[in-house]
Image (tube, helix red, strand yellow):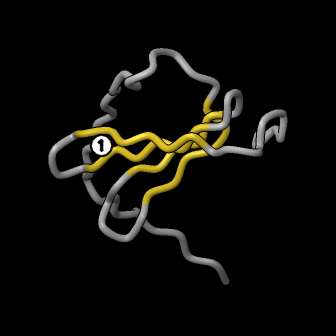
Amino acid sequence: MLAVGPMAFAESTYTIHEYPLPAGPADIGAMTIDGVGNIWLIQNEPPVLYKLVRENLTFSNYTIEGFEQAGFA
């Protein structure tokens, strides 16, 4: 016998914030969040790794030399 009762749902609110990349629009292939909440993005062409520090909303970017035309997506 299968009994189905009312389901309890947690009330959660999520917010999406958009932040412009320092270099302008980009072809982002992947995104991840590290253990302290920083957001990492990888741009396909030219290959650049971006880091958004969550605490102060500052960007760092790192050009990945030698991976041109690698197609990270």
Residue type beneath disc 1: Tyr
> On the image, which quarter does residue 61 sit in?
top left
Q: Residue furthest front?
A: 65
Q: The C terminus is located in which quarter?
A: top right
Q: Which of the pair 62/14 is nearer the observer?
A: 62
Residue at the (55%, 47%) spot, across then down: 31
Q: Residue furthest bottom?
A: 1
Q: Is residue 12 above or below residue 71?
A: below
Q: Is residue 52 above or below residue 21?
A: below
Indicate left or right for 11 with 28 as reference.
left
> On the image, which quarter does residue 69 sit in?
top right
List the residue tagged with mark 1. 14
| Residue 41 position within the rendered picture, expressed as x and y whole percent measured from the top left | 52, 43
Q: Residues within 10 Å of mark 1 (few under 14, many from 20)?
A: few
Residue at the (40%, 47%) spot, across then down: 51
| Residue 40 position within the rendered picture, expressed as x and y whole percent measured from the top left | 47, 50
Indicate left or right for 38 with 1 as reference.
left
